[in-house]
Image (cartoon, rainbow, N blue to C red):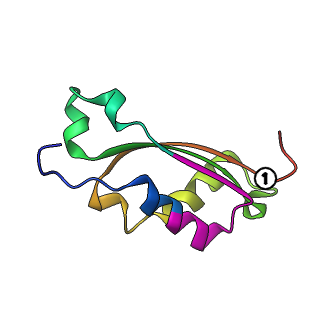
Amino acid sequence: MNGTPHVSAAAVRERLQQTLAPVTLEVVDDSAAHAGHAGAREGSHLSVRIVSARFAGLPRVARHRLVYDALSTLMPQGIHALAIDARAPDEP
């Protein structure tokens, strides 16, 4: 990845565990699938599936904002793209 910083899925998982206390959390590094496109040099491509009681009653945008807020210090360290599936425990 040519020396450009990339944030690991493990670092994202740890931060989300600490801040959002999820009942389910899956973080997948999709960076290899984006190799060769311009953004691949700018950081990691990650997919997050998270289920947390913190999302109950919140619209999608507010849920995503909570995830981005939790990762705010990691974003400039090498996250280029972040796909988020955020649900409350009672949602399928």
Extreme residue in the right direction:
90
Is 17 magenta? The answer is yes
Q: Residue at x 75, y 60 (%)?
A: 23
Residue bounds of the magenta highlight: 14-27
Amino acid identity at mark 1: Ala
Q: Which residue is mark 1?
A: 88
Q: Position of residue 39 (x, y in %)?
A: 25, 36
In the displayed structure, 53 sits above or below 86; it is: below
* SS of the residue under disc 1: loop
Q: Residue at x 28, y 54 (%)?
A: 78
Residue 56 sits in which quadrant? bottom right
Q: Residue at x 33, y 56 (%)?
A: 7
Q: Residue at x 16, y 51 (%)?
A: 4
Please name whichever residue, 64 or 80, is drawn nearer the observer in this view of the structure.
Answer: 80
In the displayed structure, 29 sits above or below 52; it is: above
In the displayed structure, 28 sits above or below 8; it is: above
Q: Position of residue 58 (x, y in %)?
A: 75, 55
Q: Position of residue 15 (x, y in %)?
A: 51, 68
In the displayed structure, 50 sits above or below 34; it is: below
